[in-house]
Image (cartoon, rainbow, N blue to C red):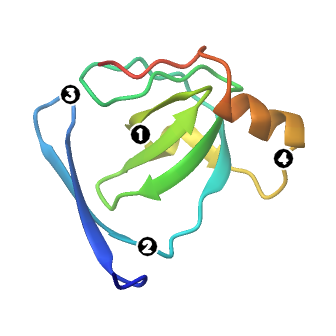
Amino acid sequence: MDVNASCVYQNTDSNGADLQTHINQNDVYFIAKVIHPFDAQANGELSLSIDDYVVVRRVAPTGWSEGECKGQAGWFPSAYVERQEKAAASKISEANSSPECDATS
């Protein structure tokens, strides 16, 4: 398997539009703080609350990001989070553990 290979991910947003993204396997995850709440409307979307922390795994050119918050994963609007250059280890742990953020399934 080519470590530098690109993958194509496809998701459908709440308007029924396909979100197709080419992702490089070398992309680096980052921590982001939620600055605007988001209520998931479709399968695969991730609900977010203000001041939650998200591990952002993918940023699509469509304006959507894919990430994980408190044990749940899904898509959310990229503009609703702010990348953090530094985050407390406890916040990183929170982003990966508790079930307060929900992915609509």
Q: Nearer the viewer, mark 4 or mark 1?
A: 4
Q: Earlier in the sequence, mark 2 or mark 4?
A: 2
Query: Residue 48 at what x, y percent from top left?
Result: 53, 23
Q: Residue at x 64, y 56 (%)?
A: 30
What residue occupies the far front of the structure in this picture? 1
Work out how far the residue at label 4 is from the one at label 3, CA to CA, in angstroms. Answer: 31 Å
Q: Is residue 87 above or below residue 30?
A: above
Q: Earlier in the sequence, mark 2 or mark 1?
A: 2
Work out how far the residue at label 1 is from the one at label 3, CA to CA, in angstroms. Answer: 11 Å
Badge 1 amino acid: Pro
Query: Residue 52 at what x, y percent from top left?
Result: 68, 27
> Label 1 near label 4: C-beta < 8 Å?
no
Residue tagged 4:
87
Badge 4 amino acid: Ala
Badge 3 amino acid: Ser
Q: Residues within 10 Å of mark 4 (few under 14, many from 20)?
A: some
Q: Is residue 80 above or below residue 102?
A: below
Badge 2 amino acid: Gln
Q: Is residue 28 above or below residue 30?
A: below
Q: Residue at x 43, y 45 (%)?
A: 66
Residue tagged 2:
25
Residue tagged 1:
77
Q: Earlier in the sequence, mark 4 or mark 1?
A: 1
Query: Residue 13 at what x, y percent from top left?
Result: 21, 35
Q: Nearer the viewer, mark 2 or mark 1?
A: 2
